[in-house]
Image (cartoon, coloured by chain):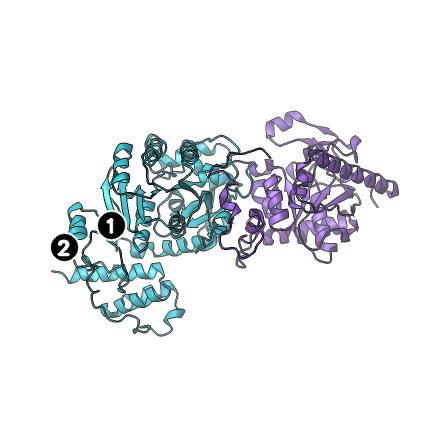
Amino acid sequence: MAERARTSLSPEGPAGTDNGGDERHLPVPHRDDLRRHLPGVEPERQLTDWGRSERIEGIFDNTLGNFFYRYWFRCEVEGIENVPATGGAMLVSNHSGALPPDAAMIGKAVKEEHPHPRPVNITVEHFFKGYPGFSMLIPKLGCVAAHPANVHRLLYDEEQLVLVFPEGRKGTEKLYKNRYRLRRFGRGGFVEAAMRARAPIVPVCVVGAEEAAPIFAHLSPLQKVTGLIYAPLTPTFPHFGLLGMLGYLPAKFHIRFLDPIHFDDEDLHLDKSLVQTVAHDIRAKIQQNLFEMLEERESVWF
Amino acid sequence: MGSSKRVLVTGLSTYWGGRLAQALERDPEIDVIIGVDSENPTRELERTEFVRVGTQHALLRRIVQAAEIDTVVDTRLVVDSATTSSRAAHENNVIGTMNILAACSGPDCNVRKLVFKSSAHFYGTEQDDPAFFTEAMGRPHPPTTLIERDIVEAEAAVNEYAEQNPETTVTLLRCTNVLGPDVRTTHTALFSLPAVPMILGFDPRYQFVHEDDVVGALAHSLRGDLPGVYNVAADGVLALSEVVGLLGKPYLPILPPWGTGLAATLLKRAGLNLPPEMLSQLRFGRGLDNRKLKAMGFQYRYTSRETVIKLAEHLRLAPILRGAREPFTYEREVEDFLRWSPHVRGSVPRGERVPRRAPEPVATPEPQAPPEPEPIAVEEPQAAGPPVEHYDDLEAEEVISLLGSLEASDLEALLEYEREREARAAILTAIEAILSRRAMGSRP
């Protein structure tokens, strides 16, 4: 880390280092100390501090979520035991589809199949925060902006599950002809975040989402007019309007959770080459499993 | 250096300066409180000495030197662009801060602690903000509104001061939006409307802090050493729809998501002022990580949710209490007489004012003041039981509705009783208001 002038106002100043009157002998790192000061839960509230709404999430879960999970995509889940029952963990998945159905289905799978169902925080582009309507709805459903500070707080301080898509927009933008070929995994920021929080990474492979919402082409003039992040040509969009984004084809979903990768040592994230290597390994692992799953699949629809 | 003894409050006539001085007066550890401002104080103060001076650094410096001030608290930052013109705000925030910092630096300076009240507007509000700003995070983007630019500049000046004066403990408090029964901000004005306007399609996250907690945080930073920057924000981040629900009001998504600035200009013509920094909050919202200050031993009395509930209670009572309490006017001669005349006998109630300090003799170290005489005999309040049966089970509003039927002596007993127990501000204010109204009525 860069040498910083130790002025009394610098963030890592003396404020954090000494915690006057602490009875423990070892000096407690400032960050550890702060975990004890997380705000308590107010049982009267229906929203979390992140804006997640139990009520609205429940409504979605019971209607659209159930319908798509059980009857439309008929999700099949393997390796759910790889998702830890306690503590922070990062789920890393491949990503596809115009309005990606994979995120919701992974969240639903943890909720339905896991012996200790836990809420999954889905990281999304901050684009949604600036778009009216989405801005209201997206956080209520348990999505948070993909900011490193948000991921760290969720993983380290609040010890929750975070779902990230390192491919980001490049994954959802890819055309049908490029299906199941993983894009670049960002800059490895997700590995860095997991290492900093010392939280395990659980790679996730989703098969089916590419066929459920295929993109045939991009309509750039329409995108420019509407200000959306992209305007894909799908079987139902744009001719059925924005709701056409939800017009998924009934492909069969297979979701596979792979063995978790643990990072127990401190300060691993400072080693940039290690970060890149791990990111590359995870990408290769997901890619390889995807090809295996595709090989085993006999039909797209059943 | 530990606890402060001789305190200079700049901006005494602002809401925060006055509130802080009142809080410090109750602290026997603090020997001297001196307040400066270019305006007369707006709150009744007992032992704070007021000097009417602006932010001329030469004059301030003389005061600091002469009174051997060890702690300077700067509460004067304008953080709400609806209150003054942008030029006056700039003059106050940037130039004023520079002058005050100049007044407390130099080789022969005794100032060992500087507390600066800043605002969470330092962080701004943007689309790609983190959900919780920590103190270590800078602004992700350069400031977009004038008030934010002023705050960033003022903080930069304080930062520079901290670097140049390593022996001085510099505390910088970034307060989020304040709500409460007493404080007036553009947000309390917004929430006082019969329906709360929102931007269509947006439900921003809002964090608040109660006015008492802000005063508490300022006082807390005088008691101990808190070097560095601290966010002051209550636990819990609410969605605006949740806030409006707690207030029991309908929400009105009348502001269009595109061209919001234009709509705000039209609303300003109609008498509703939505300054630009508020518009961006209404769009994107903001959350702060408040754990650093909590780790330094500060405890918030209210969560964000409770703060909103307190405001809601106040808004329901406001029509009843309106005009019950006369605004305080500062009279130099009277204040001087009360402070310095040898004939003033301690904590004699002034006018109809109920003594604010509890009658038990607090050893208030007032060097110049005459020795405190014995406290005036007040009927033993502790002995008085609740005048109404099941009093403790009653809600504040139910109690207030009963007050009108009580005799003056009962009211006084009730006042003492309430103070001893829960000290609900709404009840105390209501009783005081009724008592003062009766006292006025009985006079010829």
Query: How packed is label 1: few (under 14 Cα within 10 Å), some, or many (20 or more)?
Result: few
Residue designated by label 2: B342
**B10 vs B324: above or below:** above
Tint of chain A: purple
Q: Residue furthest left?
A: B444
Which chain letter matches label 1?
A: B
Is residue B282 in view?
Answer: yes
Instruction: Report which quarter residue B435 is drawn in.
Output: bottom left
Residue B390 on image: x %, y %? 38, 73
Instruction: Report which quarter residue B417 is drawn in.
Output: bottom left
* SS assignment at label 2: loop
Side (left or right) of B120 relative to A186: left
Residue drawn at point x = 19 percent, y = 58 percent: B371
Residue designated by label 1: B327
Chain that the image shows in cyan = B
* SS assignment at label 1: loop
Q: Quadrant of the C terminus of chain B?
A: bottom left
Q: Amino acid at mark 1?
A: Pro
Which chain letter matches label 2?
A: B
Distance of label 1 from label 2 (alpha carbons): 28 Å
Q: Nearer the viewer, residue B284 or A33?
A: A33
Is residue A142 in view?
Answer: no
Q: Amino acid at mark 2?
A: Pro
Q: Nearer the viewer, residue B431 or A87?
A: A87
